[in-house]
Amino acid sequence: MNRILLIEDEKNLARFIELELQHVSYSVTRAQDGINGLKLAEEENWDLILLDLMLPGLNGIEVCRRIRKVKQTPVIIITARDGLSDKINGLDSGADDYIAKPFAIEELLARMRSLLRRAGTLLEGHLLVCQDLQLDALGRTLTKAGETLELTKREFDILLVLMQNMGRVMTREKLMEAVWGYETDVEMKVVDVYISYLRGKIDSPGQPSVVQTLRGLGYVIRK
C-alpha cells in the first residue's frame, strides 16, 4: 500500500482528500502545518507527498526546498494560487507537479499514479488480507474463508481503517475522526460498540479476536 503524506491546513479539504485516497487503498497521514509536515517528511519514508503552499508555521515552498535537500520523494503542490509565477516557484522549489484548487479528485489521483509509476513505486492492489479475511477496498466487500460477510457502512469503514494501518495501534480518537469525521457529536464509546458488532461478524468461535484491544491505547490488527 502506497504511503502518502498530506500537508494541508484546510481541515475540510484535507479530510475530503484523505477519505478519497483511502477509498482507493492509499495509506494517508496528515499534517496541518509546515513545521510538523517537514518533520514527518524528513523522518519517515513516503511514496508521495501532497503539499499545500499556504501553510502556518512554514510555507510550502520552504518545506519543499528543505525536503529536496535530503530526499527525492515525489511532491505534488496543491494550492489556490494558480498564477504562472506561483507555478514556476513551486516547480523550482523541487516539486514534481502542481495542481490548482478547486480540482477534480480524479485528476489528482491520475497525477499521483503518474508520479508513482515514474518513481517505480505504484502499488495498484486494492485487496487487504489478514488471516482468512480478504477486504476489497474498491468494491467494499469482505470475505472470510471465501464466504461473503455483510457489514454495515460503519463496521466496514472501521475494519478498513484498521487493516490499512495493520500493526499500528489506532486510538478511539483516530477511529472516530477517520469514520465519523472531525465535526461529529457522537460519543467516543460508540467506537467500542461498533468494534463489538464487528467482532461478532469476523471472529471465529474459540479463537482470539482479529481486532485486539490494547487497554488505555486503542485497537490494532496484527499481521
Image: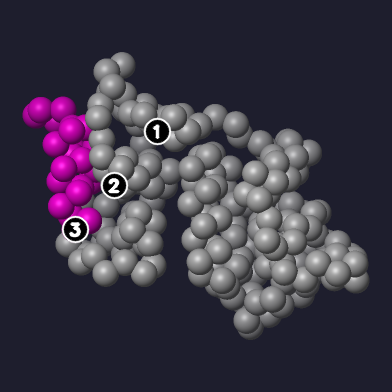
The amino acid type found where label 2 is placed reads Arg
Q: 159 or 204, which is in the foreground? A: 159
What numbered label is drawn on residue 140? 1
Residue 164 image offset from top left, x and y in percent: 43, 43
For the residue carrying disc 1, how many other residues have a C-alpha within 10 Å: few (<14), some (14-19), or many (20+)? some
Residue at x 36% of width, y 29% of height: 141
Residue at x 10% of width, y 28% of height: 205
Residue 119 image offset from top left, x and y in percent: 75, 41
Q: Is residue 27 in view?
A: no
Residue at x 27% of width, y 52% of height: 219
**Magenta residue check for 200:** yes
Mark 2 or 1, nearer chain start:
1
| Residue numbers of the magenta segment | 190-212
User: Quadrant location of the N terminus?
Assistant: top right
In this view, the residue farthest toward the top is 146
Q: Is residue 38 in view?
A: yes
